[in-house]
């Protein structure tokens, strides 16, 4: 027994150390999710289906290009709409700065005009959908405090469940959210948003994940606004990472006028 | 000769039509509007209706893009049809150079509504009706070349033929300017001879742009002519009575500067331009005087996803005393400083189904206000029904808005995009 006690103590210490290594804290999980591999740049076609409370649907179809500039702490996005017809040919460019307001431009083809446009709140609706701008570009983990609640399986994947609360409530519609982060790919599998009264107000779910160029990629997902009764499903196709020829020139006012 | 002019159009359309990869789209639109009060100018209420079809056809081959936007408009009042091209261009890229030739639209400057630097295309002032917003700008025949290098942008535009503003020119048109109406009522003929098509009358512009930090800065120079036109009155030497009025487009060169950038969530815009005219002394009553025009704009999203854009515009006449001493008969003397404010509010709600819009223009020294509220309803993608009004409030019949004080109207516009 005298010999067993140190051994047992050593085993317990080793087990707790191993558990600590496998279970990072909530902040580390959300940072891993924020930095999930997605190449230095990427390109995809997107089909967004917006469903109103009465069941009627609208479609937004666009191509999206992204390029990350890590040194400058900015990701640049170039979006061109092909549907619906009233916005066909309209182009957006967003320079998403870490910790600063975005720079946004819009090209109106009928006026041959590139306009700098005011940056909506990051929690504002992306092209009238249930997605926010932050859902597209990713919410900076530094904006929230995070707590790892548990680990559980979800849709056959092992996931960390993290509770996050905004440090600043101004301009944020949720008081806390739960995120299910895939342990292997670090993709967010599901998110539930709650208001200050504890009511669930919004949920987002990844519905299809595929490996593209060995990078786990969200191919389809749905966001539901539970208060408004609306939902938006997005499907990606023709996804490419580290695209040759996706030069800096693709993210300029010149490209907005003549891609 | 007309056949020769149509030849490139026919070739363009043929090449587009022959292509299976042609991109196409467009819109069909109906608009019905009616005056809400008896017009002081027309002595009767009026009703206007029109239907329009605009196509957009484009085709890219070998790095060259052909674009045609033909448009046909039918006016119910006189059952007339009008064909035009909103754009008809060929465009391409050669290394750092982008080029475009043909009938085209340009946007210079960074502000809205009151053109300070947006002076390439003439405006259509024969309508104060709310069709598509781009209707107010008329295309010009031009060649454009833009060079890009190291963040710099140098644009050159050449316009071989002068094209002026379009103004209402018939006595029964509710949008006829008061001064023109008085001439017509006095039986004085109004002539509008075109500017001769000579090399010396060609116009051109240059723009040089470069970002500085988060700001986009541009400098502009236009060697051109007054696009609005100035009525010059000719008198009988014996009697001193007016014989005729001729619309003229004297030389007018413009040099200006614009800046646009963000301060946090606020978007700021600034434009200033010096208008140099041939009447340097300010003593010719029929030539516009030298002016400096400035616009400051502020835009941001307000709570409730409402986009607000406020502009302050000021025009400064540089030789006011000479102007006051030699002002044209019948014209109201303008103050040295002309202040104006515009406010635009816009939002999208219900997933884009409801789109309220409000535009207002206010000029304090003339006690005049124009407002255009509109509610757009989009029951489905690509279809809009919009109910709106254009309201004029002015106390003097010889000011821009005041002369249309009784011309308030409501309209219903339906548009189907395809």
Image (spheres, helix red, strand yellow):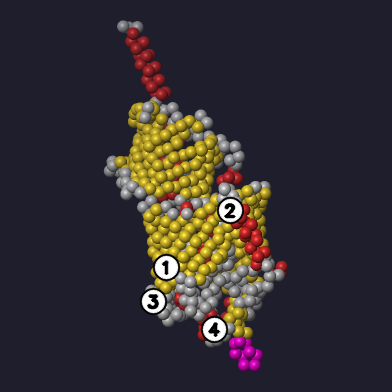
Residue B75 visible in the shown view:
yes
Label 1 CA crowd tier, 10 Å (few <14, some 14–19, many 20+):
some
* Main secondary structure of the magenta stretch: loop
Name the residue carrying label 3: B37
Residue B152 shows in this picture:
no
Q: Which residue is mark 4?
A: B183
Ranked by sequence position, the earlier of labels 3 and 2 is 2
The part of the chain drawn in magenta is B235-243
User: Which picture quadrant has residue B42?
Assistant: bottom left
Q: Are marks 3 and 4 in contact (CB under 8 Å)?
A: no
Pick the quarter of the image with the N terminus of chain B: bottom right
Instruction: Say which residue appears at 42% left-offset and 47% top-offset.
Output: A59
Inspect the magenta stretch and tell me whether residue B239 lies in it. yes
A164 in relation to B263, above or below: above
Q: Which residue is mark 1?
A: B32
Q: Secondary structure at mark 4?
A: helix
Q: Are marks 1 and 3 on the same chain?
A: yes
The residue marked by circle 2 belongs to what chain? B
């Amino acid at each position: 027994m005298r010999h067993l006690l140190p051994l047992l103590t050593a085993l317990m210490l080793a087990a707790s150390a191993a558990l600590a290594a496998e279970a990072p804290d909530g902040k580390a999980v959300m940072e891993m999710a924020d930095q999930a591999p997605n190449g230095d740049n990427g390109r995809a076609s997107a089909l967004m289906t917006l469903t109103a409370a009465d069941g009627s649907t609208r479609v937004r179809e666009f191509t999206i290009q992204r390029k990350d500039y890590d040194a400058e702490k900015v990701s640049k996005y170039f979006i061109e709409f092909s549907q619906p017809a009233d916005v066909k040919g309209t182009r957006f460019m967003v320079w998403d700065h870490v910790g600063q307001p975005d720079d946004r431009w819009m090209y109106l083809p009928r006026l041959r005009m590139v306009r700098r446009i005011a940056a909506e709140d990051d929690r504002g609706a992306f092209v009238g959908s249930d997605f926010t701008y932050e859902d597209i570009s990713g919410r900076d983990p530094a904006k929230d405090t995070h707590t790892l609640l548990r680990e559980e399986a979800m849709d056959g994947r092992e996931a960390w469940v993290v509770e996050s609360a905004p440090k600043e409530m101004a301009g944020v519609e949720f008081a806390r959210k739960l995120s299910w982060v895939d342990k292997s790919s670090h993709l967010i599998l599901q998110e539930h948003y709650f208001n200050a009264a504890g009511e669930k107000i919004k949920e987002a779910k990844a519905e299809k994940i595929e490996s593209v160029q060995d990078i786990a990629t969200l191919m389809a997902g749905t966001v539901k606004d539970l208060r408004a009764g609306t939902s938006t499903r997005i499907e990606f196709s023709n996804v490419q990472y580290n695209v040759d020829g996706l030069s800096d020139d693709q993210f300029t006012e010149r490209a907005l006028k003549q891609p | 000769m007309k056949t020769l002019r149509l030849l490139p159009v026919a070739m363009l359309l043929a090449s587009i039509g022959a292509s299976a990869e042609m991109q196409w789209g467009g819109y069909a639109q109906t608009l019905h509007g009616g005056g809400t009060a008896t017009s002081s100018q027309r002595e009767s209420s009026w009703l206007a209706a029109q239907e329009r079809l605009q196509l957009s056809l484009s085709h890219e081959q070998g790095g060259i893009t052909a674009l045609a936007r033909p448009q046909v408009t039918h006016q119910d009042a006189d059952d007339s049809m009008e064909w035009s091209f909103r754009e008809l261009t060929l465009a391409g890229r050669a290394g750092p150079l982008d080029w475009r030739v043909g009938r085209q639209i340009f946007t210079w400057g960074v502000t809205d509504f009151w053109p300070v630097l947006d002076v390439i295309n003439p405006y259509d002032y024969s309508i104060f009706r709310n069709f598509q917003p781009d209707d107010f700008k008329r295309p010009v025949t031009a060649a454009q070349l833009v060079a890009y290098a190291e963040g710099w942008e140098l644009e050159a535009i050449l316009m071989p033929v002068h094209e002026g503003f379009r103004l209402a020119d018939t006595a029964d048109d509710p949008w006829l300017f008061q001064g023109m109406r008085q001439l017509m009522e006095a039986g004085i003929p109004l002539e509008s001879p075109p500017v001769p098509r000579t090399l010396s009358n060609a116009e051109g512009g240059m723009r040089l742009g470069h970002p500085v930090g988060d700001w986009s800065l541009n400098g502009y120079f236009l060697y051109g002519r007054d696009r609005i036109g100035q009525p010059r009155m000719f008198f009988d030497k014996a009697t001193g009575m007016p014989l005729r009025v001729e619309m003229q487009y004297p030389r007018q060169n413009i040099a200006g500067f614009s800046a646009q950038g963000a301060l946090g969530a606020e978007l700021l815009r600034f434009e200033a331009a010096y208008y140099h005219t041939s009447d340097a002394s300010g003593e010719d009553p029929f030539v516009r005087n030298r002016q400096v025009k400035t616009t400051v704009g502020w835009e941001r999203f307000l709570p409730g996803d409402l986009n607000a854009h406020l502009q302050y515009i000021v025009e400064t006449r540089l030789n006011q005393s000479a102007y006051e001493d030699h002002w044209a008969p019948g014209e109201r003397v303008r103050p040295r400083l002309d202040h104006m404010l515009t406010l635009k509010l816009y939002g999208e709600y219900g997933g884009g189904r409801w789109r309220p819009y409000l535009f207002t223009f206010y000029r304090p020294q003339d006690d005049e206000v124009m407002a255009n509220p509109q509610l757009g309803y989009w029951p489905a993608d690509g279809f809009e029904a919009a109910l709106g009004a254009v309201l004029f409030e002015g106390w003097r019949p010889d000011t821009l808005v005041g002369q249309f004080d009784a011309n308030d109207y409501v309209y219903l516009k339906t548009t189907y995009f395809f």
